[in-house]
Image: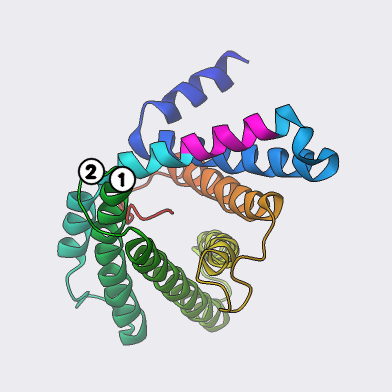
Amino acid sequence: MQESLESLVGVLETYRGRDKVIRTVCYGSQLVGGVLSQRTGESSQVGKSLLLLSAQLSHCRTVLRLFDDLSMLAYASTYGLGRWEEDSCLRWISVLTNIADQFYYPCEHIAWAADADLIKVKSDKWWLFSTVFWGISLLLGILRSLRLLMLLRNKLKRDPSSPSHSQLHRQMRGELLTVLSSMADLSNAIHWMPPGFMWAGRFPNWLVGLMGTISSLIGLIQMNDSSSDQSSRDLSEPPSDG
């Protein structure tokens, strides 16, 4: 019990860890609130309160992301054109992902500022732009993970008796989880697009919450795996996590 508490405190003391926990609670509240509201109608006070909590936590994350631009810029600058990447396909997917992530933040900031009446512009188109860039980033992330899975599988086939066999399997598991997480987020990104685009606007609250909860829990699992498997490599990750 004490060990679990210390582990949770350790997660909450980091910015990324706190964001992932807030994200999980946010979508979890939307899932439960959406289910309760659908079952009992608008009369469910608990369901309504959970949906309000979810909205407030989502707003909290939006405000915190106002300070992520420099982190993303530093990450993108460090990666550059990824000249060290052995696979050119991975390289250009990563470069395009970094570009999409970099544009995502200012678009969201402008939309937030417009909603807060800090600037006199309509926020709708800026929320749309931020959702589009988020969706592009997610789609590119899925393609990158699928490409990595293919390369890792080929490496396993070439040398099945390699001592790094288990490490390659862990990497493949991580990429599979990334694909599942990104697909869940991408389904929500499409839902938030203008009506008429695929299934835009058709998800009930509980389904948006379910997709987000799945993605958030996978993020927590991956964060736990990476912290327990901290080796000689120190990989940065882009802060975009809608």
Q: Main secondary structure of the magenta part?
A: helix
**Left or right: 237, with 207 as reference point:** left
Residue at 33% x, 52% y: name it.
239
Q: Give the amino acid type for the residue marked by disc 1 in the picture.
A: Arg
**Left or right: 241, with 78 as reference point:** right
Q: Which residues are magenta?
A: 48-57
Return the residue at label 1.
65
For the residue pair 211 and 110, the one nearer the viewer reads as 110
Residue at 72% x, 28% y: name it.
45
Locate residue 88: give its quadrant.
Answer: bottom left
Question: Do callouts 1 and 2 mark residues in contact (Cβ within 8 Å)?
Answer: yes
For label 1, the SS is helix
Categorize mark 2 by other alpha carbons within 10 Å: few (<14), some (14-19), many (20+).
Answer: few
Residue at 40% x, 36% y: name it.
60
For label 2, the SS is helix
Report if residue 228 lies within the magenta region. no
**Left or right: 73, with 195 as reference point:** left
Q: Percent position (x, y) of residue 46?
A: 72, 28
Q: Assign the C terminus to one quadrant of the image.
A: bottom left
Q: Residue furthest bottom?
A: 88
For the residue pair 178 and 86, the one nearer the viewer reads as 178
Return the residue at label 2.
67
Q: Percent position (x, y) of residue 147?
A: 47, 80
Categorize mark 1 by other alpha carbons within 10 Å: few (<14), some (14-19), many (20+).
Answer: some
